[in-house]
Image (cartoon, rainbow, N blue to C red):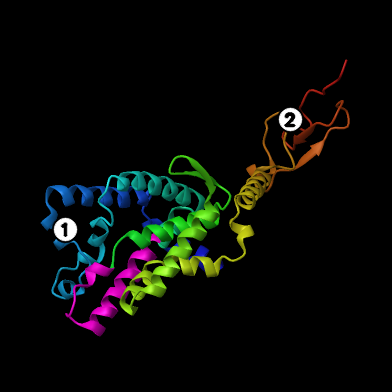
Amino acid sequence: MKGMNKLERSLGKIAIPHLISYIIGAYAIGLVLFYVAPRMLFYLTLEPYYIFRGQVWRLVSWIFVPSDTSILSLIMMIFYYQIGGQLEQYWGTFRFNLYMWEGIVFTDIAAIVLYFIIGTKMPLSWFFSTQYINLSLFLAFAVCFPNLEILLWFIIPIKMKWMAVVYALITFYEILQSDWVVRTAIIASIMNFIIFYLSTRNYRQYAPQERHRKRKFQQRMQESEHRTKHKCTICGRTEKDGEDLQFRYCSRCDGNHEYCQDHLFTHQHIKLQ
């Protein structure tokens, strides 16, 4: 965690606020292109053969290529927009950016490695899509909010942790049943979640109750830093207004009244009737 905090201090300024909005926007544009100008999607796929021939935009543009073109994809966009926004609010902008970019970069690396192994024998874009990037987002959300209930098919209430178990088992089965190329693509796409899972096995520090307790503690600490020990009853100055200021209580005033050196001997004594 210390390393993460140090990295955030160094690179936090370049993090993109509301990153999930841009990602979902890319999904929506890709879905429109699929129905309006499907041939354009060919120039957006993750194909290392063309990347090494100058089409470097493909390293990122493949997120525009829809993994699902049915009407359900619109519902999934809304769903991932919501959980992505909550994760960014929960983790912070930098950590959410890092998580999502890790998924994209690991996918790019896997595609390039496979290209050097396989060569140009087959188009690699068939094996890479945003499907498992979305899965990694879902799994991370389930780890952070395991007891949150959602309505499966808008009818059945089910907790996120059980949905995550089902998706994890399905993915594991796909890995077992696929060849090594597909396995590489799947594992690379969810590598960001694997790293997150292994590095945050102590879930107490990520639990909502613990995060709330930590925020309250930090607020109290900040409030204590602004508190003062001495304050002049007349002018309101405190020890923070100058290191040379001195404060004394007046024994002739009723009650506890403190004055700075400028008003200690010149104030009108307070007497209670």
Q: Quadrant of residue 51?
A: bottom left
Secondary structure of the residue carrying tag 1 is: helix
Q: Residue at x 43, y 57 (%)?
A: 137
Q: Which residues are magenta?
A: 100-127
Please identify the quadrant where the N terminus is shown. Answer: bottom right
Residue 173: say if magenta: no
In the image shown, does 145 or 68 lie closer to the viewer? 68
The residue type indicated by label 2 comes to Thr
Residue 158 in sight from this viewpoint:
yes
Q: Is residue 118 magenta?
A: yes
Q: Position of residue 214 (x, y in %)?
A: 63, 51
Q: Amino acid at mark 1?
A: Leu
Name the mark on residue 233. Answer: 2
Residue 227: image location, x then y, percent? 69, 42
Residue placed under numbered mark 1 in the picture = 41
Mark 2 falls on what kind of element? Answer: loop
State the residue at coordinates (27%, 79%). 114
Callouts 2 and 1 close, C-beta under 8 Å = no
**Residue at the (36%, 58%) spot, across then down:** 14
Answer few, some or many: residues within 10 Å of disc 1's Cα (few below 14, many 20 plus, some between 14 and 19). some
Asked if residue 233 is positioned above or below residue 193 in the image, the reply reads above
Q: Is 90 or 233 nearer to us in this picture?
A: 90
Out of 190 and 216, give the one closest to the viewer: 190
**What is the distance, in whole Å, between disc 2 and disc 1 at their CAs?**
73 Å
Residue neighbourhood size for the residue with mark 2, other residues' Cα within 10 Å, grouped as few (<14), some (14–19), many (≥20):
some
